[in-house]
Amino acid sequence: MKELRRDLKDFKRVLHNFHLESQSLSPDMQKRVLHLVNTKASITPKLIKDILRHGKV
């Protein structure tokens, strides 16, 4: 799988979907999320909730 970057259409689609749900990710949080995805970390519902609630990765 190719490395995901903030300027790619796929990531922009994810941000757009967040916007439709009245959510947003700060640029710093975007970098953290991309790092997690690119390092093939397990993305679980708990991880997503923790990130959204506390900004922790």
Image (cartoon, rainbow, N blue to C red):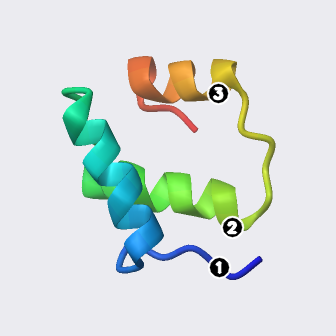
Q: What kind of residue is marked 3?
A: Leu
Among the 4 quarters of the image, the one containing residue 38: bottom right
Q: Residues within 10 Å of mark 2 (few under 14, many from 20)?
A: some
**Cα separation between marks 1 and 3:** 20 Å
| Secondary element at image label 1 | loop
Q: Does residue 12 sit above or below 48 in this rendering?
A: below
| Secondary element at image label 2 | helix
Rendered location of residue 17, percent (x, y) = 32, 43
The quarter in which the C terminus is drawn is: top right
Residue identified by numbered label 3: 47
**Cα separation between marks 2 and 1:** 6 Å
- Of 24 and 31, nearer the camera is 24
**Lower sequence index among marks 2 and 1:** 1
Residue identified by numbered label 2: 38
Disc 2 to disc 1: CB gap under 8 Å? yes
Q: Does residue 21 sit above or below 24 in this rendering?
A: above
